[in-house]
């Protein structure tokens, strides 16, 4: 059985946003960083939600103005998290059972330290063949 942990594969640091940030500003930061998600955090760096490129597709489809919309209005609020010492196999199962493509990683205090994505898992699996 593979002993690889989330900490071995996760991206750190992770791009975060505050819930009152404008959607347009966060979209620009995501585009500049070349990433598809941000973790929305509170003042203690604990996750409140996640915002993905898919959420922006919905915003566009609904005709919502990103200049007048905050991240908290778009984010998925019930965020599933993991810790860096959990196995990649457990992470994949968590992501599958929750139908999510991004798994924020938190430390013992619940603060966001990184993120594991479906792309990270795909790259890992491809390296095993």
Image (cartoon, grey):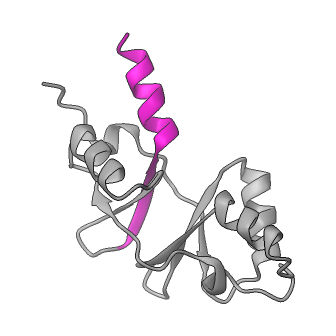
Determine the image quadrant of residue 100.
Answer: bottom left
At 27% from the left and 39% from the top, the residue drawn is: 88
Q: State the residue at coordinates (49%, 76%).
A: 49
Residue 105: image quadrant is bottom left
Name above or below for residue 64 compared with residue 103.
below
Foreground pick, 65 / 116 = 65
Q: Position of residue 97 (x, y in %)?
A: 30, 53
Placement of 123 over or under 58, stated as above or below: above
Residue 124 position in % (x across, y down)? 40, 27
| 129 sits left or right of 12 in the view | left
Q: Residue at x 72, y 47 (%)?
A: 34
Quadrant of the drawing holding the C terminus: top left
Q: Is residue 125 magenta?
A: yes
In magenta, the rendered stretch is: 111-129
Q: Position of residue 90 (x, y in %)?
A: 22, 45
Foreground of the two, 126 or 100? 100
Magenta segment includes 118: yes
Q: Is residue 21 left or right of residue 117?
A: right
Residue found at the far front of this picture: 62
Query: Residue 123 location in percent, x, y?
Result: 48, 27
Q: Nearer the viewer, residue 84 or 100?
A: 100
């Amino acid at each position: 059985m593979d002993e690889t942990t989330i900490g071995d594969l996760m991206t750190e640091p992770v791009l975060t946003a505050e819930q009152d940030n404008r959607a347009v500003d966060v979209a620009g930061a995501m585009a500049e960083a070349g990433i598809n998600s941000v973790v929305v955090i509170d003042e203690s760096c604990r996750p409140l939600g996640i915002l993905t490129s898919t959420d922006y597709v919905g915003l566009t489809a609904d005709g919502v103005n990103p200049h007048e919309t905050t991240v908290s209005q778009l984010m998925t609020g019930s965020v599933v998290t993991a810790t860096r010492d959990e196995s990649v196999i457990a992470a994949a199962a968590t992501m599958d059972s929750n139908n999510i493509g991004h798994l924020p990683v938190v430390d013992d205090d619940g603060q966001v330290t990184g993120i594991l994505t479906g792309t990270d898992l795909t790259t890992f699996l491809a390296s095993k063949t």
